[in-house]
Amino acid sequence: MSSVFADAPVMPVVNGPFVPPPAPPAGTPVNNDVTTTTTTTTVTDQLNHSEQFQAWLKNNGNGPVIRAPQAMNTPPPPPIRVVNQGPHPLPYEESREVMRNLAPSPAVPPPPESEAAFGAMLQQNMPMTPEQIVRLKQAVDSTQRAAAIPANIPPKPVSTTLMINLAPGATPPAVRLAQGYVTSLVFVDATGAPWPIAAYDIGDPKSTTIQWDGKSNVLLVQGMSPYGDSDLVIRMVGLTTPITIELVSGQRVVDYRVDLHIAGIGPNSKDIPIGTGLPNSANPVLLDVLEGVAPGGSKQLSVRGGDCQAWLLGDKMYLRTRLTVLSPGWVGRMVSPDGMIAYEIQKSASVLVSQYGNPIELKFEGF
């Protein structure tokens, strides 16, 4: 409060309200035309009012006296400090120090009741200390990390190529699954063209889930249990014999992508081989070459003129390339869905191939 109240006059407390003089009776004529008479009457009324007020003060002057409160010695609040940061903002440490200095410090310590209420509010809303909060976060992080670590070593992901043998008594190919991993099965014909799927059936639907768009040549298979065996039967468009695949879970290796080659010409094939170029049975050597594995007992040759890998095995050469062989004629060929081609040709020092429609010559050395 301001110190102005210290100089205020002492006013007595009255015992009753001040009663003004009664108004003149209604109907009393007033002469508004005579200015002198009106002025005299007004002065006389004011004197009468003053005498009555003095009498009222004399009769009511024995009450208690209200004095103005004394001035409080509370110091004024500190002025707010305005920090001019200039064209560039302050660093983090300096900004934090400025914010601390801007906070006003209480000149008068708070009462004990306020401190008790403040402590109770802190205890209710923040019952843990900062050290306990850090320990709690570390414990939660350790628990989540332990829950995410698999019980066994994660399986090694690989991509493989398998040949489908539809002959009676043939062993069906096996696909390795793992819980939490999706395996894609891609079906192609002997020329590498997609072979669409007509339908499929799963032996154990609870342990394996399959997704299929209903028209393509790709199945997405996922194991739902860490261990277990099952089988998958697929019917292909235009193929009377169904294809059976064994599904195995819990191995150290998981197949990310499996290219399944069917010995035959599918409905989507555009590159139909002519003559005896297509072997009647699957060639396991070509299958290894298609995956980039050198045939057993072969010798690798150096190639100049294009992107190609070559191996010599006896009197046969095996090529792995994306180029189309024109001459000499190939004996066997196998194509993967990504466009890689494996050729089996007779031994030759040079081969004519086509690259984007342009013929180029590949030369081989190291025989």
Image (spheres, rainbow, N blue to C red):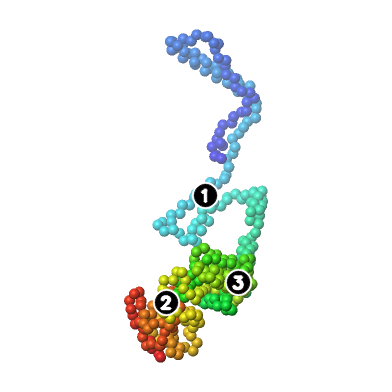
- In this rendering, position of residue 238 left or right of residue 120: left
Q: Earlier in the sequence, mark 2 or mark 1?
A: 1
Q: Residue at x 54, y 68 (%)?
A: 235
Where residue 232 appears, as percent x and y from the top left, is 58, 70
Q: CA distance from mark 2 to mark 1?
A: 96 Å
| In contact (CB < 8 Å): disc 3 and disc 1 | no
Residue that carries the numbered disc 1 in the rendered image = 78
Q: Which mark is residue 166?
A: none
- Identify the residue position indicated by label 2 in the image: 273
Among the 4 quarters of the image, the one containing residue 278: bottom left
**How many residues crowd mark 2 within 10 Å: few (<14), some (14–19), many (20+)?**
few
Q: Of callouts 3 and 1, which one flags the residue occurring earlier in the amino acid sequence? A: 1
Amino acid under label 1? Pro
Pointer 3 residue: 231
Q: Residue at 64% across / 49% down in the picture?
A: 114
| Vertical relation: 344 (above or below) 208 | below
Mark 3 vs mark 1: in front: 3
Residue 142, located in which quarter of the rendered image? bottom right
Q: Nearer the viewer, residue 18 or 145?
A: 145
Instruction: Tell me the quarter of the image containing the C terminus.
Output: bottom left
Residue 161: x and y, percent?
51, 76
Q: Amino acid at mark 3?
A: Asp
Specify few, some or many for label 3: CA neighbours under 10 Å numbering under 14, 14-19, or 20 or more.
some
Q: Is residue 119 visible?
A: no
Element under label 2? loop
